[in-house]
Image: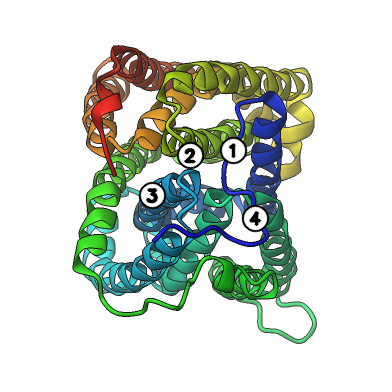
Amino acid sequence: MNTSANNSNLQVAISNRQILKLTLPITFALLVPQINYLTNNIFLGWLGESELGAAGITGVFYIVVAIIGFGLNSGVQAIISRRAGEKNAEEIGKTFFQAIRIALLFSAIAIVLFYFIAPVFLRASLQIQEIQDQAISFLKIRIWGLPFLYLFQLGNGLLIGTNNSRYLKYAFISEASLNILLDYTFIFGKWGFPELGFNGAAYASIISEATAMLVVFAVIFYKKFDKDFFLFTFIKFHLGLTKLILKQSVPLILQFGISVSAWLFFYIAIENTGERPLAISNAMRNIFGIVGIFCWAFASATNTMVSNIIGQGKKDKVIFLVNKIVLLSFSFTTVLCLIINLFPRMFLQIYDQQIDFVDESIPVIRMVSLGIMLMSIAIVWLNAVTGTGNSKINLYIEVIAIFLYSFFVYFAMNVWKFSLVWAWSSELLYWGTLFILAFFYMKSGKWEKKVI
């Protein structure tokens, strides 16, 4: 039975205004946790270069398991967007509740596996004993935030997929504000709390993620989306829908997992060269997070809008839509890259590191900026593939790109002994490969036969 929500325009239009209306709230929502993460690293940078380097390793390693929720959310978001395009609110509710059940199961499995795998892997991979101990201790605390994170991501996916991204800001503001406050309190032992150092950031993050989850669900209930989309009406296990969610999400989970695992491999290769290159690379990761926010926001909008447009029966408009999003994504990202490159010292000096740290980082910023600008194009085309429902193609594209990326990183760091600047040129190879493969797949029109 097709039903539509009472107070929500589920179908999107193909216009710059609609793209920005959907994207800008996502951008803001992504900017807030990046500021949060940046502040976290600033505090840890004050503790020392070792802590800043360990933050890079733990950050990437946590993303490896957090990406399970991101992949699940991306697959579910594509399904919800398709149902929104079809104005089928009842199926949105069914999909969302089944996704909650899957998210909780995945988080429990991830926590158990993590405790067995992470310590062994980190001790075998990292060379510096101090960073080993810091990373393992931190991650054993941090992993308990996964259930909150997965449910938070699903709540965000529901809002984006139903064209309600404007409500994202409440949860993200709450999360970031609380995390910054608790970081300062727990890391340095302020206002009567014990000084927890590096581990203080882990406790702060868990509490903040739990708060964000509660806020996003409070918004869903306050705006009565639970009734509009029948979110908790169909609570029985639905095998067919569960299979569809897994069919759409598992390739994306593998895709994102492979991608971030390769980045972890890159960071381990950097760590083996010393604390300074690792600390610089962690700063570069912050730049990727902040400058790349428009890339990720436009990518998420692409996933939703492509799926929604197909649900409306307008497959002939998809390429036109993607081209409009690419132009906007590249334009916004280029402006941010220019700002970072005009004032690199102002950004780098916030880490309170020595002047030679700043001098060595500036050439790396130039290379990273080129990679981000290419990413702004490639990630839109890749998420267009996601929006069509052909998530297996996403996985195939990712496998090819990561193979080339890992091959280059290994030889660049271990055989050719490239400088840190040229090691970061691996991003150009990675994003260039993703763009070429995703672009030609979308142009082929093979996706038009896919039904979800």
Name which quarter of the figure residue 264 lies in: top left
Q: Secondary structure at mark 3?
A: helix
Q: Position of residue 90 (x, y in %)?
A: 44, 64
Q: Secondary structure at mark 1?
A: loop
Q: CA distance from mark 3 to mark 2?
A: 9 Å
**Residue farthest to the front?**
1
| Earlier residue among tags 3 and 4 | 4
| Earlier residue among tags 2 and 1 | 1
Whether tag 2 and tag 4 are in contact, CB under 8 A, the answer is no
Residue to which mark 1 is pinned: 12
Residue to which mark 2 is pinned: 308
Mark 1 residue type: Val
Give the residue drawn at x 61%, y 18%.
Answer: 330
The reply to whether residue 333 is visible in this rendering is yes
Q: Residue 159 versus residue 350: which sits nearer the camera?
A: 159
| Earlier residue among tags 3 and 2 | 3
Q: Secondary structure at mark 4?
A: loop
Q: Residue 321 versus residue 392: which sits nearer the camera?
A: 321
Q: Position of residue 363 (x, y in %)?
A: 60, 17
Whether tag 3 and tag 4 are in contact, CB under 8 A, the answer is no
Whether residue 220 is situated above or below residue 396 in the rendered picture: below
Give the residue drawn at x 25%, y 33%.
Answer: 450
Name which quarter of the figure residue 214 lies in: bottom right
Whether tag 2 and tag 1 are in contact, CB under 8 A, the answer is yes
